[in-house]
Structure formats: C-alpha cells, structure tokens
Image (cartoon, rainbow, N blue to C red):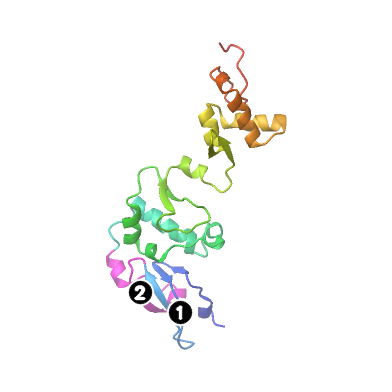
Amino acid sequence: MTEAQLIPVGTVFGRWTVIGQADGTHKERKAPVRCICGHERLVSCRDLLRGRSSGCPHCSHQTHNRSNSPTWNSWQSMRDRALLLAGTHYAHWGGRGIQICDRWMVFENFLADMGERPPGMSLDRIDNSGNYEPGNCRWATKYEQAQNRKTSKFVLLDGDEICVREAARRLGIHPQAIRVHMRYHGVSHQAAVDHYAAGRHLLRRARDPVTGRFLKDAR
C-alpha cells in the first residue's frame, strides 16, 4: 500500500480537507478535497503530501478579508482540533470521534449560523460528546465553559442540577470550602453542598473564604 493510499478522509492539508478516497494510477493518484472557501477538486496525493498544494486559487485571492478575525480564528481552531491528525489537541477532539458537520466546513456557513464571536467568548459545544454543528454550539465565557467540562462535578441545589462551582457561588461561599468540608468529614460533593444549604441562613455571617469557617469577630 502506497503512502497516498493511507491518507484518511478528513485529513487537512493547509486549506484543503480530504473528503473521499484517493483514486487513479500509482503515480497519478488524486484525492477529492474541499477548500475552506467551499470549492472542491481532485488534487494529486503527491502534491498534498509534499506541501505543493494547500488551497484552491480562488481562496488564495479571497481569504474573506477575515483571516485574522476572532471568528475566523475560532473556526480554524475548531478545524484543527477535529481534523488535524498531527495537532496537539486532536486526541481529545477528533481522536474521540468529534466531527464537524459538512455545512461548517465552509467558513461563510459557520459565520451565518454562529454570527461574529463576542468579545471574551470562545466556541463551546453544549453536549461535550456531540459534534460541531448548529444546535450544539454556542459562544461562551470561560466560566460557562468550565461549567460544561466533562470533568465537572454536578450536584442538586434548589431543584437545579448545577456544577459545584456554581453551587458555591449561589451559596455565597468559596468552592474550596466545599472541598475542605468533604475531606474533613469524608462526604460527597452533594453532602457538602447540602450541609451549607441547610445552614444557608447562617451564611450571612462572615466566613473564611477558604475553610468556610465562621470568623471569630463575626457579628
């Protein structure tokens, strides 16, 4: 099997993304590719592998005048995470099966669906096991993304299922207070949150922001 035959669908070469299996003779094998501007064509596998072709002529002249915009950068980062096999973060996205819908392979479609990236926000998948596609993505703050991480611990407070950090915020205590209570009493996240929720009326008194204990001079 030649090296060209090993090019998997979804591999990114510059602005090209391989969208099908390569075909042709041994020396003239060509792969169907799609440029980020939406144009599709057959490109020599040798040219792709040797870096002699990285995008269509249309795209080289029409970079949407946005190649350095925040929205463009978020879109390109999304592509790198899901498609760039040699990328630093590929194992946590594309390697886990996270894909990009066909519509969002073209930047204009992504922009039409998501709009411009608001200041201080970045692209976030609502369902961490879902793909990059309309309905499963949003612009979110770092705080919102932290709440949505697959490693976040969730508890029930006032009938809402929320992460521990959000529960601490609602109770007016530092998240570290919950962790200290857990270690000291050997209880779960839920039990620690329930403890502070039960004494919520006492939380108006001054507490140490780390241990959660009442300060001696509290009134």
For the point 57% across and 43% down, the residue is: 152
In the picture shown, does residue 211 fall above or below 46? above
Q: Is residue 195 left or right of residue 24?
A: right
Q: Which mark is residue 9?
A: none
| Residue 190 appears in the rendering | yes
Residue 160 relative to residue 13: left or right: right
Q: Residue at x 32, y 66 (%)?
A: 37
Question: Does residue 53 appear in the picture of this structure?
Answer: no
What percent of the width, then of the height, locates residue 33? 40, 74
Cα distance in 3D space between marks 2 and 1: 18 Å
Judging depth in this view, the residue of 115 and 191 nearest the camera is 191
For the N terminus, the image quarter is bottom right
Residue at point 46% right, 80% down? 22
Eye-nearest disc, 2 or 1? 2
Q: Nearer the viewer, residue 5 or 188?
A: 188
Q: Circle 2 is placed at which residue position? A: 40
Q: Considering the image in quadrants, where does the C terminus appear?
A: top right
Q: Position of residue 49 (x, y in %)?
A: 47, 74
Front residue (pair 93, 2): 93
Position in image of residue 25 (x %, y %): 46, 88
Question: Where does the magenta region start and end?
Answer: 36-62
Q: Secondary structure at mark 2?
A: strand
Q: Which residue has dot 1 on it?
A: 46
**Depicted 24 relative to depicted 216: above or below:** below
Residue furthest to the bottom: 25
Location of residue 56 by image quarter: bottom left
The answer to whether 170 is drawn above or below residue 131 in the figure is above
Question: Can residue 57 be found in the magenta stretch?
Answer: yes
Mark 2 is surrounded, within 10 Å at the Cα level, by few (under 14), some (14 to 19) or many (20 or more) other residues, namely: some
What residue lies at 36% left-to-right and 66% top-to-bottom? 36
